[in-house]
Amino acid sequence: MEERRRSSPNVAAGTVCRPRGMVAAELRTPTAAPAAAAASPTEDKLGSSWRSMPSPRAPLSARSASPPPPPVNTVALFAELIEKGTLSATPRASPWSVDSEGSDLDVVRAWISSALPMSEVRGVYRVECSAVTAAAYTSVMPTLGPQRLLWHGTPWASVANIAQTGFNRAYCGRHGVRLGKGSYFAEDAAYAARFCGRAVESRAIFLAGILPGRFCRGEADLVEPPLPSGASGVRFDATVDDVSRPRVFCVFRDFQALPLYLVEAA
């Protein structure tokens, strides 16, 4: 089993790996109903009762298709979370020295704009997660760091819960479990945006801090990271799509991820 731990002699303690950017109802005029056709010989013979026969049932795939979710009032949602102290739109000094120009919100906006050049960035908010969630994350940073900054796209229905209490792997499986049954994060915001739901006016994308620790290539339906070959008792900490060049990470413990910023992109 391959393994790779993200470390570098040139990376000082407390530094992070930055996310990689990517530079990459029609109105119908109502028509009148067609006039009734003349009765056919078949109808004369069978009578009109054939008209009451049920029509063939639609294919199962068509009948089981779920309707698109109702539109979300994002203005009201953000106002509520800001009032609770869960989100903040007040700029702060950037914590990333390499991108010292502008505030932290400006830097995140620049990152998401680079990754989604065809999208409109409607808002960037700092997430003030619960103290318990933040403390649990901070306590394992020396063991599972260094921290990586990765993106997580999600439907609007999950935004409030994630912002308040962090990520919960119990909700995994909605978009597949090819790397295991955990919470997924991507290096590219454009890839993460694919998991925000269909037919939505705008998308919710979190920028999260991730502590992957030791990782290996993932497999479908893993409920926890596997054991290294020949090792005794100590499992890997996360799984990835490619050990030599990981772009998608799956973490299996909720304290390995912390939501830092929330972006609304349309």
Image: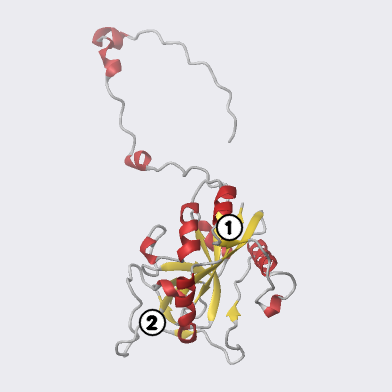
x, y percentage for residue 60? Answer: 32, 41
Q: Residue 115's quadrant in the figure? A: bottom right
Which residue appears at 46% of the width and 84% of the height?
A: 4
| Residue at 46% over, 11% down | 35
Q: Which mark is residue 111?
A: none
Is disc 2 in contact with disc 1, using a CB cutoff of under 8 Å?
A: no
Q: Nearer the viewer, residue 7 or 220?
A: 7
The residue lying toward the viewer, choosing from 251 and 73, is 73
Q: Relative to 7, is 73 above or below?
A: above
Taking the view exactly as shown, the residue that stands out farthest to the bottom is 9
- Secondary structure at numbered mark 2: loop
Three-letter amino acid code at the position of disc 1: Ile
Residue name at image x 36 percent, y 71 percent: 219
Q: Secondary structure at mark 1?
A: helix
Label 1 sits on residue: 82
How packed is label 1: few (under 14 Cα within 10 Å), some, or many (20 or more)?
some
Give the amino acid at mark 2.
Answer: Phe
Judged by depth in the image, the label closer to the viewer, 2 or 1, is 1
Position of 129 relative to 119 (above/below): below
Q: Quadrant of residue 93?
A: bottom right
* Residue 149 in the image, given as x and y percentages of width and height: 56, 73
Residue marked by disc 2: 236
Q: Pick the quarter of the image with the N terminus.
A: bottom left
Q: Position of residue 142 (x, y in %)?
A: 49, 86
Q: Earlier along the polypeptide chain: callout 2 or callout 1?
A: 1
